[in-house]
Image (tube, coloured by chain):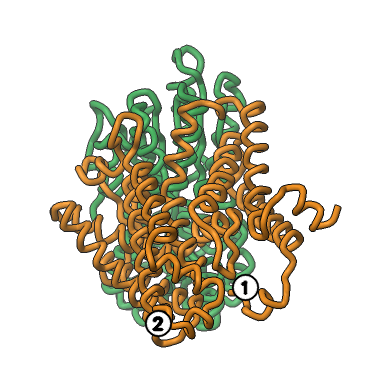
């Protein structure tokens, strides 16, 4: 499958412009620097200290400094209970925009609804809740799941001469990305009975758990054709198991991720083979632009969610490998 | 059938019954899995089981020594990750592996010493002291050394990483070799050294050991420093194998749960005073076989957690049934 990155970027840019025009309507020209100065934005990620969220935060901070609004980051450090508490506190402070990074589709749904009802615009970043809100910026997980599965079918399916065996390593079975990636992938695999999913076990986002699962699965299925890990960081553990078993030239390791330079290094080291990158650095800029729009009063006319799909970059090992597809903090 | 009758049937002294039950269950599971799970009864899978259990066994050695002395170390996983962080940061920065290892050993020994000092000299309970030190170590290492990062990714091409994840002899990986070394060191500490006798005495009756003039404070220092070093070794092999030092291992808590599970299932009572490496091996065997079998059967992580929890509850219930509390065990108090 071939992607035209330029088309994707253009698509995202158009989505933003469209969003702006839909939302601002008759408001005419705006001067972001003066209109939104002094407003308050609170960002609650799943955790800081990972390249994904640090990359987003860097771009949002730059934008806040440029336009004069305040950006406060509250770090729950991977604790779901702390996240719910921080969100409750943030809602009570009535910021102009709340940026949330949902760990599961359900966890923050009630609070997102509560925030919107209180007049706070909620921007959901990369991982979507069941509860719609003012805006979403992030990867189109359904498309990624579908495209990775299509690629797996091409590499491991009928006519490939391979076993068709695939292991899937989600982060958490209830995480938004894992739910959508698995749904989309299994829809594709359903039409290809030669593809056999021999393992579908979550790693809790931990590389060591992914490594242990993979080492065990490889023993049972030494003819495994592909591994589809839902996040590049934990999938690197799986890639290490493949390499330790000496199967790096036989088993294709697929992952998705934010695409920082560590991902490219893993591809160079033959730990990962193909990574669908949603370019966290670009997402940070898109999120910052969406915050600007929300602070200026942007909203969809029909009340639906403004949405920006992140353009994809596909980082592949082999002759077409391009290290410039990765970004550096 | 009464508890006494069952005790007679298995022919064991008090305290050895649980380990026999666990051993029987493990054997039963091995037979069951070998018959019904394709790929379970292979030498390749045995190697995977050993390799995947190496760090768990090392951590369990440290925890077992602590628990036998009537202590508890909740900072073990934090120390494991912190030790691996020191080593990885130094090695990635170009320091020789031997220097990095030495610095990591000294730093972790210091953490173990502080734990022991808080428990033996300040008089804080082991649970609270090690819980506090776990938080402190995690916080300091994440923010001062990793500058807020949760995960430190290691390049597979680094020679130290390659060594720790590779083979030391044909068919024997470095993690498995380190696991054997740790088991031997634990056996020597508990069964051969003078400190070992003091550790058992402390577990049997701490007050009596102290009043008879045994060096309980010095023994506490040895216990917690030993546990720290086992945690460091476990951290080194885990980070080299997975290519990552991951502080979420501390916050998720499942590894600490597994370590305590191994010790308790193996038959080492939480009130201390009994047990040895045989118990660690029995407990680890059950967890390793269960984990391997459930992974091969494609059970979800949540189902695996639930089943392990169920096994722990069953083990405690069986232990309480076969070893009912008497006046002595009730009055000395558990953790």
Give x and y (percent) for residue B317.
Answer: 73, 60
Nearer to the camera, B203 or A211:
B203
Q: Residue at x 54, y 59 (%)?
A: B275
Q: Is residue A298 above or below residue B169?
A: below
Judging depth in this view, the residue of A327 and B29 nearest the camera is B29
**Residue under label 2:** B118
Nearer to the camera, A117 or B104: B104
Distance from disc 1 to disc 2, alpha carbons, whole Å, reads 46 Å
Q: Which mark is residue A114?
A: 1
Q: Position of residue A205 (x, y in %)?
A: 46, 51
Tint of chain B: orange
For numbered disc 1, what is the local secondary structure? helix
Considering only vertical position in the picture, is A70 above or below B102? below
The quadrant of the picture occupied by the C terminus of chain A is bottom left
Quarter of the image for the N terminus of chain A: give it. Answer: top left
User: Which chain does the numbered disc 1 sit on?
Assistant: A
Q: Secondary structure at mark 2?
A: helix
**B30 horizontally vs A271: left or right:** right
Instruction: Give the crowd class for mark 1: few <14, some 14-19, many >=20 residues within 10 Å.
Output: some
The label shown at residue A172 is none
Question: In the rendered image, which quarter is residue B235 located in?
Answer: bottom left
Q: Position of residue B158 (x, y in %)?
A: 21, 44
| Colour in which the image shows chain A | green
> What residue is drawn where x is 35% and y is 57%?
B151
Q: Position of residue A145 (x, y in %)?
A: 50, 38
Q: Residue at x 18, y 52 (%)?
A: B97
Is residue B309 in view?
A: no
Task: Specify the farthest residue to the bottom.
Answer: B122
């Amino acid at each position: 499958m071939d992607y035209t990155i330029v088309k994707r970027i253009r698509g995202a840019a158009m989505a933003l412009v469209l969003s702006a025009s839909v939302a601002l309507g008759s408001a005419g020209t705006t001067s972001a620097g003066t209109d939104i100065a002094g407003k308050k934005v609170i960002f609650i990620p799943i955790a800081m200290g990972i390249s994904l969220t640090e990359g987003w935060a860097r771009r949002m901070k730059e934008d806040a400094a440029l336009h004069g609004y305040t950006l406060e980051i509250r770090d729950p450090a991977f604790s779901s209970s702390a996240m719910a508490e921080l969100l409750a506190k943030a809602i009570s402070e009535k910021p102009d925009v709340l940026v949330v990074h949902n760990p599961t589709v359900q966890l923050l749904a009630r609070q997102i609804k509560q925030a919107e009802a209180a007049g706070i615009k909620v921007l959901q970043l990369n991982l979507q809740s069941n509860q719609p809100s003012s805006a979403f910026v992030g990867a189109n997980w359904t498309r990624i799941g579908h495209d990775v599965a299509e690629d797996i079918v091409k590499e491991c399916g009928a006519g490939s001469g391979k076993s068709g065996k695939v292991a899937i390593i989600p982060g958490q079975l209830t995480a938004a990305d894992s739910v959508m990636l698995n749904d989309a992938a299994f829809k594709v695999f359903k039409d290809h009975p030669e593809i056999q999913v021999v393992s579908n076990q979550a790693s809790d986002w931990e590389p060591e758990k992914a490594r242990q699962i993979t080492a065990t699965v490889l023993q049972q299925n030494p003819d495994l054709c592909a591994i589809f890990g839902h996040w590049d960081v934990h999938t690197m553990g799986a890639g290490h198991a493949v390499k330790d078993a000496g199967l790096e030239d036989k088993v294709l390791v697929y992952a998705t991720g934010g695409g920082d330079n560590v991902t490219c290094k893993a591809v160079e080291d033959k730990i990962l083979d193909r990574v669908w990158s949603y370019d966290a650095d670009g997402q940070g800029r898109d999120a910052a632009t969406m915050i600007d729009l929300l602070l200026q009063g942007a909203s969809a006319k029909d009340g639906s969610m403004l949405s920006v799909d992140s353009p994809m970059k596909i980082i592949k090992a082999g002759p077409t490998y391009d290290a410039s597809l990765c970004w550096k903090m | 059938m009464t508890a006494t009758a069952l005790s007679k049937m298995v022919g064991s002294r008090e305290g050895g019954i649980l380990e026999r039950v666990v051993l029987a269950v493990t054997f039963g599971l091995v037979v069951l899995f070998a018959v019904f799970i394709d790929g379970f009864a292979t030498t390749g899978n045995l190697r995977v089981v050993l390799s995947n259990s190496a760090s768990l066994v090392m951590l369990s050695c440290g925890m077992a020594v602590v628990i036998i002395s009537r202590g508890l170390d909740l900072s073990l996983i934090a120390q494991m990750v912190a030790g691996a962080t020191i080593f990885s940061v130094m090695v990635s920065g170009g320091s020789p592996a031997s220097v990095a290892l030495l610095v990591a050993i000294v730093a972790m020994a210091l953490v173990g010493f502080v734990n022991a000092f808080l428990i033996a000299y300040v008089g804080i309970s082991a649970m609270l002291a090690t819980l506090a030190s776990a938080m402190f170590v995690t916080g300091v290492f994440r923010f001062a050394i990793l500058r807020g990062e949760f995960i430190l990714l290691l390049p597979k091409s680094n020679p130290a990483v390659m060594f720790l994840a590779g083979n030391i002899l044909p068919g024997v990986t470095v993690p498995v070799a380190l696991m054997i070394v740790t088991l031997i060191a634990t056996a020597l500490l508990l069964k051969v050294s003078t400190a070992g006798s003091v550790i058992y005495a402390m577990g049997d009756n701490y007050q009596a050991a102290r009043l008879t003039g045994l060096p309980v404070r010095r023994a506490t220092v040895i216990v917690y420093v030993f546990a720290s070093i086992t945690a460091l070794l476990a951290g080194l092999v885990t980070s080299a194998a997975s290519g990552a030092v991951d502080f979420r291992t501390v916050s998720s808590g499942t590894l600490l749960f597994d370590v305590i599970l191994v010790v308790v299932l193996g038959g080492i009572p939480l009130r201390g005073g009994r047990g040895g490496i045989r118990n660690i091996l029995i407990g680890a065997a059950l967890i390793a076989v269960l984990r391997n079998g459930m992974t091969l059967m494609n059970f979800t992580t949540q189902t695996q957690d639930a089943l392990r929890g169920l096994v722990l509850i069953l083990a405690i219930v069986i232990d309480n049934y076969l070893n009912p509390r008497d006046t002595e065990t009730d009055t000395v108090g558990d953790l």
